[in-house]
Image (tube, helix red, strand yellow):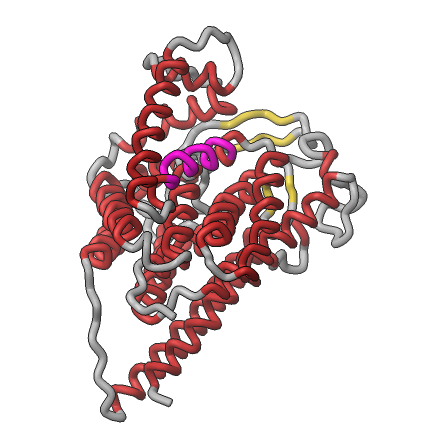
Amino acid sequence: MPYLDRARWVTDKYILAMLGLFPLFWGFHGYSALTKSKFWFFAIATGLWFAVTLALLLMGLASGERYSLDVRPVHLAVGAFLALGGLSALLSDYGSVCLMGANRYDGYLTWVMYGLIFFGVSLLGRPRRRYVWAMGLAAALSSTLATVQLFGLDPFSLYPAGTNYYDKYIVYNGAFLGTMGNVGMLSAFLCLAAPLTLVYAARSRKPLDKVLFLPAALSVGMLLACDVDAGVLALAGCAVVSLPVVLREDRQAKLAAAGCILLVLAGLVVLWSWPGQSGTIYEMSQVLHGHLSDSFGSSRGQIWKQGWALWQERPWLGAGPGTAARRFAIQWYSDVRNQTVTVTNAHNAYLGLLMNNGVLGLGCYLAAIGCSAVTWVRRRKRNALFPALGAAMVCYLIQDFFGLALVLTFPMLWVLWGLLESRTED
């Protein structure tokens, strides 16, 4: 077997592990150390995959194999993003903090691993149906566990001893469900799994793939049960953006695009004239009018205002990857065990990148997304997987406007992103 094929075989197993096993892994200390557990799963798996793959490719070169690199604008944009991130870390006032991050493992080394995933999967991976099944099974199992937990049970002792889901914000800080930790992280994961399985099941011509409607339904149901506004909004936004792309026929796609544009315009009119005085829709209406209160979005208004001000201190390259936690000066008192809650994240992935990597870094990241949007549209008719991958990315990137971009879910986005940009198919 050629060494290149061996490297592709290893990459295939890595993708299966990251989409099928990583979402279900919670470590050995329950929710109290879930972020640490998932980070080390991700770091060890990625490190082993990269080392073995690199060794195989070098042995192939030594034996006379020759490889061609399919470098496209999206690769240049991601490469520039990583290079600027390295420069930002080098020039940062926070020194070695930039490598691992101040907390939550969001430093430059983690971003380098995301880049390795993208380049490795896009150049060596094959977009296969088994990956949809792997993520669908993981989502179904995690949603099933979350459903059991909603009944007040804790079969795997994930909560602090003697507690369950309904002790949230009473005995312990936070609300935890499923195998992703915080309900916001579970919602982010399902924003990948729900559209991926739903669109693939709808587009696939194989009867067995219709079974994927089951994990899709479980994922959508749990998204609604989580009651996380970002996830629900992302699902709705994904439906509007993706529908014209995932339809097979050009005439249907054009009609759907026109209908979606009209729907968006009508929605903006409704938001602008919304008569309510409270709730998420009221807050969105007020933002549309240019009023962002500190209390909006569970105090995201206050966080975003300070994040914007912090970005202006270092606008071009930011303060360095993973440094947001060192810069925020927002705290709240919580009567849960008399704790003080400190803000350590921008609660908006794009604002976080703006703070940490500056406008240059964020610009490269958005340019890469734009390149892949073009790829998604161009490849929408090739098979069932490409439209599903794009829809999953759209849903996740919408929720990222309110999300944390943590290692709990972010590696899976980069795996799917790499598959969307892969040139080889079954």
Check residue 51 for magenta coloring: no
Span colored in magenta: 232-243
Q: Where is residue 114 in the image (x, y as percent from the top left)?
A: 37, 58
Height in image: 192 above or below 271? below
Q: State whether residue 175 appears in this view.
A: yes
Quadrant of the frame with the N terminus: bottom left
Which residue is painted at 50% across and 8% down in the image? 277
Which residue is painted at 43% across and 22% down in the image? 302
Magenta stretch, main secondary structure class? helix
Q: Where is residue 336 in the image (x, y as percent from the top left)?
A: 68, 30
Identify which residue, 40 or 75, lies in the foreground.
75
Which residue is painted at 23% across and 59% down in the image? 75
Quadrant of the frame with the C terminus: bottom left
Q: Which residue lies furthest to the bottom in this view?
A: 63
Which residue is painted at 37% across and 17% down in the image? 287
Answer left or right for 266 relative to 205: left
Answer left or right for 56 relative to 410: left
Q: State whether residue 408 appears in this view.
A: no
Identify which residue, 358 or 381, lies in the foreground.
381
| Among the 4 quarters of the image, the one containing residue 65 | bottom left
Number of numbered tags placed on the structure image: 0
Height in image: 57 above or below 120? below
Q: Where is residue 328 in the image (x, y as percent from the top left)?
A: 41, 32
Q: Where is residue 289 in the image (x, y as percent from the top left)?
A: 34, 12
Check residue 238 for magenta coloring: yes
Height in image: 91 above or below 352? below
Q: Which residue lies furthest to the right in this view?
A: 162
